[in-house]
Image (spheres, rainbow, N blue to C red):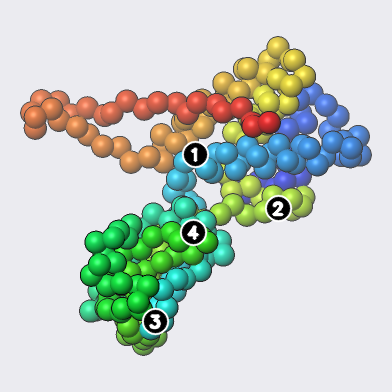
Amino acid sequence: MRGTTLVKLLDDLRAETRVSLNPAHNAQVRDSQVKRLQSVQERMWDDFDWPHLRVERQFDTQAGQRYYAPPSDMTVDRIGRVEIYADGRWQPVLPNIGSEHYSAYNSDLDERAWPPRRWQIHEDGTIELWPIPELNADPETLEGRVKLTGIRNLRPLVNDGDVADLDDRTIVLYAAGELLAGAGAKDAQLKLQAASKREAKLRGQLSPRRTVKMFGLGKSTTPRRFAPHYRPPEG
């Protein structure tokens, strides 16, 4: 289940690791428990494009502006699709800008054209558009509006009332398994296996199924699915 509060995650984690459920008894280790839950959720977020975290964000082009800041709640690396509204419709802006493109319109010389047809991540983390727009976006017609589709960042998981963006049971089982493994508990691997199995099931339910026919003939088959491999925390 998603949307579980941090205080509930901590309670479940303590139950799985067989320590006192009294918050006062865990005051000295609360920060490390929270950090463990955070790192597990971050790892899960990094490993898969969870559909419920897919969002659209928009910004307007400005004449002569080459670079644009990404949305505050989206990491530029998790942008999956970029489109621009031009000539009355949304058009794709393709990734990667090469020397052949700069030969056609040299951005270093402020050569401009319309509409932008390429984008890439600049070294400072901004979004570069090519060619440089020669027009300002029109808020009435939407001409020049850029739309980004991607996976949003996780919300903070620091205070008791903060909620998890991903499945609570998977997060707790992974975190419990790691803590128990550090303590040499015999059931640590069982916790990790249960977490991996649950995560694989969730991914399978959220991934589109495709049927494949060999040479267009015969019975349709569904590609095999593979369970995610547990990655131990770094350090």
C-alpha separation, residue under disc 3 versus residue under disc 2: 41 Å
Q: Mark 4 is on which residue type?
A: Glu
Front in this rendered view, residue 198 or 121: 121
| 53 displayed left or right of 114 | right
- Position of the N terminus by quadrant: top right
Front in this rendered view, residue 173 or 90: 90
Question: Which residue shows up at 70% across the image and 20% down it?
Answer: 181
Q: Mark 1 is on which residue type?
A: Asp
Mark 4 or 3 closer to N-term? 3
Q: Nearer the viewer, mark 3 or mark 2?
A: 3
C-alpha separation, residue under disc 4 versus residue under disc 3: 19 Å
Q: Element at badge 3?
A: loop
| 162 displayed left or right of 28 | left
Label 1 packing within 10 angstroms: few (<14), some (14-19), many (20+) = few
Q: Is residue 132 above or below residue 121?
A: below
Mark 1 or 4 closer to N-term? 1
Question: Which residue shows up at 76% across the image and 52% down it?
Answer: 159
Mark seen at residue 47:
1
Q: Is residue 234 above or below residue 61?
A: above
C-alpha separation, residue under disc 4 versus residue under disc 2: 33 Å
Mark 3 or 2 closer to N-term? 3
* Residue 154 position within the rendered picture, expressed as x and y whole percent measured from the top left: 59, 52
Evaluate whether residue 172 shows in this view.
yes
Q: Element at badge 2?
A: loop
Question: Which residue shows up at 71% across the image and 36% down it?
Answer: 36
* Residue 49 position within the rendered picture, expressed as x and y whole percent measured from the top left: 45, 45
Q: Quadrant of residue 175?
A: top right
The residue that disc 2 covers is 162
C-alpha separation, residue under disc 1 versus residue under disc 3: 37 Å
Q: Quadrant of residue 20?
A: top right
The residue that disc 4 covers is 123
